[in-house]
Each structure stands twice: as structure tokens, then as C-alpha cells.
Image (cartoon, helix red, strand yellow):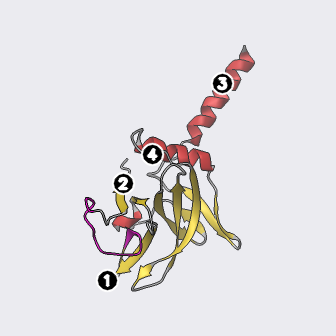
Amino acid sequence: MKKLLLTIALLVTALCQAQIDFNSKTLMGEVTPNGPVLLIEESTLVTEINNNFGSNVTKLEKCKIVKGVTMGEKEEEFYYLKFTTSITNKTLVKYLFNYNGKLYIDPVNETEPYQYSYTSCEGVEDCKPHLFVIDGEKGWTCGTSLACVAEVTEENKCIKSSSVFMP
């Protein structure tokens, strides 16, 4: 009986520690010569994201860290989390902060909206997320066009949404 209770206590402790606090300084990955590496268990991260978005949203299945280059007036390398699902053409991204090759989910004294939000792109054709720079400001877009298209039009085959998780 004591072994069973000890096993249950250890399991509960492990499950509690597996939760990710998206509002604290969390080391998500690191940059290596072979590319970025995710340091958090992928399934734990995907589960936490799905739990934060609730049951009415298509469940995401995979996550990886991707190296990107900004579009617009300035080309700058950056890293981000990329969540995907095989059910729909949906991609969710979150900017990561690179401090000496360590990739964190949260900034240090930063105030730009793109740094806190999760951006979702869903659609066909070129509906992938891109970080752009215009007038020195960064922002996420879906696709390569920076023009706004009303969601009700037939031409809009790419829908963007943003979410911010508050403490």
C-alpha cells in the first residue's frame, strides 16, 4: 500500500511540474549548429496550448522551433514556436526571445504586441505566418501580402487571429 501511495504521489508531482507557466521566464529551446532545438517535451507543450485555447478550437498536434527571417523594410533572423495540425490548414506561432542562443517564450522589458501574442493562420494557398517590419515596427501577418481583406469575401482564403494569454 505504501508503494502504491508513493507511486501516486510521485506521479502527481510529475504531472504538476509538467505544466508550463506561459507568464514566466520559460526556456523553450536553444540554438545549436544543427538548428534550433525544443527543450520542453513536445506533447506537454501541445497539450498546454490546446488547454489554453479550449475545446471549441481545432486541436493542434505538433510543435517545433523554426528559424525565420522578417519581411518588409528589414531582413532580420528570429526564432518562433510553430504549432500545426493535420486536421486543417492551421498554423499557430509565438515569437521567441533569443538571449545568447537560449530561446525564451517571454521578453525582458519588452512592450511590442507581437512579442506577447500567439498568431493563428488558417487557409489555403500562401497562408503561412510571417513576421514583417514596417516603419521600424514588427507584426505578424498571414501570407505574404500586408493588405487587409474582409473575411466575408470569397477572395480571402487566409484568416488571421491573435490571442494573448493573461495571468
Q: Secondary structure at mark 2?
A: loop
On screen, residue 38 versus residue 22, left or right, reads right
Q: How many numbered marks are there? A: 4
Tell us which disc is closer to us: 1 or 4. 4
Q: Residue at x 38, y 63 (%)?
A: 158
Q: What residue type is disc 2 on?
A: Val
* Labels 4 and 3 touching (C-beta < 8 A): no
Q: Which mark is first along the chain, 4 or 2?
A: 4
Q: Which mark is first along the chain, 2 or 1?
A: 1
In whole angstroms, how far apart are the C-alphas of marks 2 and 3? 34 Å
From the top left corner, tell me how far across and down residue 151 is, in percent: 28, 60
- Seen as rendered, the residue at the extreme front is 154
Is 154 covered by the magenta stretch? no
Between 78 and 142, the one lying in front of the other is 142
Q: What residue type is disc 4 on?
A: Thr
Q: Residue at x 40, y 76 (%)?
A: 132
* Labels 2 and 3 touching (C-beta < 8 A): no
Residue carrying label 2:
164
Residue carrying label 1:
135
Q: Secondary structure at mark 1?
A: loop
Q: Secondary structure at mark 3?
A: helix
The magenta span reads 139-153
In whole angstroms, how far apart are the C-alphas of marks 4 and 3? 32 Å
Give the crowd class for mark 3: few <14, some 14-19, many >=20 residues within 10 Å. Answer: few
Residue carrying label 3:
8
On screen, residue 66 versus residue 151, left or right, reads right
* Labels 1 and 4 touching (C-beta < 8 A): no
Residue carrying label 4:
58
From the top left corner, tell me how far across and down residue 128 is, in percent: 46, 66
In whole angstroms, how far apart are the C-alphas of marks 2 and 4? 17 Å
